[in-house]
Image: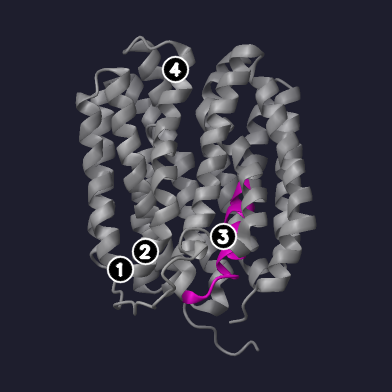
Amino acid sequence: MNAEKPPLWNRNFIQCCISYFFMSFAFYMLMPTMPVYLVEKLQVDTSLVSIALSSYTLGLLCVRPFSGYIVDSFNRKQLYLFSFCMFSLMFIGYLYATTITTLILVRFIQGGFMGLTSVAGNTITIDVIPSQRRGEGMGFYGLTLNLSMSLAPVLAIGLYENTGFNPLILVAFGTAMTGLLTVLFIQYPNWKKIKRPPFSLDRFILIKALSSALSYILTAIPYGMIVSFVVLYGKETGVANPGYFFILMAAGVGISRIISGKLIDRGKIHVVSVGSIISLACSFCIFSLFHSPTVFFISSLLIGIGFGVSVPAFQYVFVNVAPPHLRGTATSTYLTSFDMGVGSGTLLAGYIANRFNLSSAFLLGGLLCFMSVLVYWFFAKPAYEKNKLIG
């Protein structure tokens, strides 16, 4: 049993991680800076900021239900290259988006291409990871996304404050193009197309993972809240340099990935999943109720650990109930669930902040995580045990 495990860090896996890191790093440079740019430069009313921020999510959701089927039906690497290229070029559109309408349009289109790019990239990565090390591999691959989400805002805030919005966009464009170049070095064989019935719902959504999808949406809602509004929340509660939240969150993600993937590969998937969601629920409640710099930054580390464990754990659950020819659909369903949660969290936090305050929004986020635990334990866990595939 402990005989030699196939290597994980081969050339293909490394290139997959690098390309995904640069793609998401480029995009998440806009998350903390876009609200400030809209309010300060375009003079957009704060009530419209959430709509502008979530327009890319709408683009994602328009594409994601079909992206899994597309990825499962065509050459995955060629599709990855095309969608990545279009995603990168859309950064140039921000330079010409001088009204709220044109900016929403650019984000909507870029969101659609990001949806297709991420599904293609995730599916290719799952294909090149040895099945015996899938949990560990997806953990490290997910780490690239979490690190980019955590580190990109720190660089972006500094760039925006010192150089302005247009130079920030050019840096994001260059970062995305660097990621596109790394895709060329991925050695990926042609995937054999498998015939399917003329119409079946599993073309667009992985039916076996619907309960897991609901649990994941509930977990992702507070993530959308925190990524979009934590800087404003820090300023509201008197925290100096709230951008450091993202650095500590990234540290928490890195700490969690050292052990979580190996635990998943040893069959501890449910312990890992439930433990991480409970940790998130408690962290968000503390974060919302106690206002001090110490609590702010300790919570950022704990929130990073919680998401660092739960994100790859959920992906493992989705992928492990899908046969190889449905991995694109499984990845699409997994990512769509996350996008729905993040988009809903952004809109919900903006609405609650206008009616009450951001503390109330984050408290609701913690309660939704507790709900996610119940959905996972009573519905997602039994569904997984019934449908999981071996090997």
Which dot marks residue 74?
Answer: 1
Mark 1 element type: loop
Residue at numbered disc 3: 315
Q: Is residue 362 visible?
A: yes
Question: Looking at numbered disc 3 in the image, what kind of residue is underneath it?
Answer: Gln
Where is residue 6 drawn, in percent x and y?
49, 83
Q: Is residue 242 visible?
A: no
Q: Are marks 4 and 1 in contact (CB under 8 Å)?
A: no
Question: Looking at numbered disc 1 in the image, what kind of residue is underneath it?
Answer: Phe
Q: Nearer the viewer, residue 26 or 9?
A: 26
Where is residue 267 drawn, in percent x and y?
70, 72
Residue at numbered disc 2: 71
Q: Are marks 4 and 3 in contact (CB under 8 Å)?
A: no
> Can you tell which quarter of the image residue 271 is in?
bottom right
Question: Looking at numbered disc 4 in the image, what kind of residue is underneath it?
Answer: Leu
At a point 67% along the width and 34% down the height, the residue shown is 299
- Mark pair 1, 3: CA separation: 22 Å
Give the mark nearer the N terminus: 2 vs 4. Answer: 4
Q: Are marks 2 and 4 in contact (CB under 8 Å)?
A: no
Q: In the rendered view, would you say 237 is above or below 95?
A: above
Q: In the rendered view, would you say 55 is above or below 315?
A: above
Q: Are marks 3 and 2 in contact (CB under 8 Å)?
A: no
Mark 4 element type: helix
Which dot marks residue 48?
Answer: 4
